[in-house]
Amino acid sequence: MLRTQLNDMQPGFRLLTDLSQLESMDPACAPYIGEIMDLLRDRGLELVVRVIPDSHKDIGLNILSFFHYGSDVRAETYENLEQAMQSLSAP
């Protein structure tokens, strides 16, 4: 389903990832998250904005980003949705 939706995306798109309700995530999810990151990068993702209120609940997204996005995709992390939305609306 994600592959189909990505067909409609133009290069340079931005993504909001709201993990504010995340309580835990099994480490076994990492390969799947990496695969999604690869798909997004290949389709032209420019910026990913993450909402992670508690930095202790970061599941290693910065490390995954390094390997799957490289320097092609900018990633920003905010503590709340309001800050993230401001970042997304900035030129």
Image (spheres, rainbow, N blue to C red):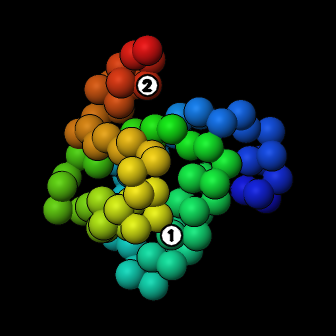
Residue toward you, 54 or 76: 76
Q: In the rendered structure, which amino acid carries the disc numbered 1?
A: Gly
**SS label for mark 1:** helix
Give the image location of residue 18, x and y in percent.
42, 45
- Compared with 28, 65 (above or below) is above
**SS label for mark 2:** helix
- Proximity of marks 1 and 2: CB atoms separated by less than 8 Å: no
Q: Is residue 49 left or right of residue 79?
A: right
Q: Is residue 83 left or right of residue 71?
A: left
Question: Which quarter of the rendered picture does the C terminus lie within?
Answer: top left
Pointer 2 residue: 88
Residue found 73% across the figure and 38% down from its top: 9
Give the image location of residue 61, x and y in percent.
34, 62
Q: In the rendered structure, which amino acid carries the disc numbered 2?
A: Leu
Residue toward you, 41 or 60: 41
Question: Which quarter of the rendered picture does the N terminus lie within?
Answer: bottom right
Q: Is residue 86 left or right of residue 11?
A: left
Within the image, what quadrant is residue 88 found in?
top left
Dot 2: few (<14), some (14–19), or many (≥20) neighbours within 10 Å?
A: some
Q: Is residue 23 visible?
A: no
Q: Is residue 3 visible?
A: yes
Give the image location of residue 21, x and y in percent.
37, 52
Which of marks 2 and 1 precedes in the sequence?
A: 1
Residue found 19% across the figure and 52% down from its top: 54
Q: Which mark is residue 34?
A: 1
- Distance (Cα) linking label 1 and label 2: 22 Å
- Compared with 59, 22 (above or below) is above
Give the image location of residue 52, x and y in percent.
29, 48
Dot 1: few (<14), some (14–19), or many (≥20) neighbours within 10 Å?
A: some
Residue found 39% across the figure and 73% down from its top: 25
Residue found 46% across the figure and 38% down from its top: 47
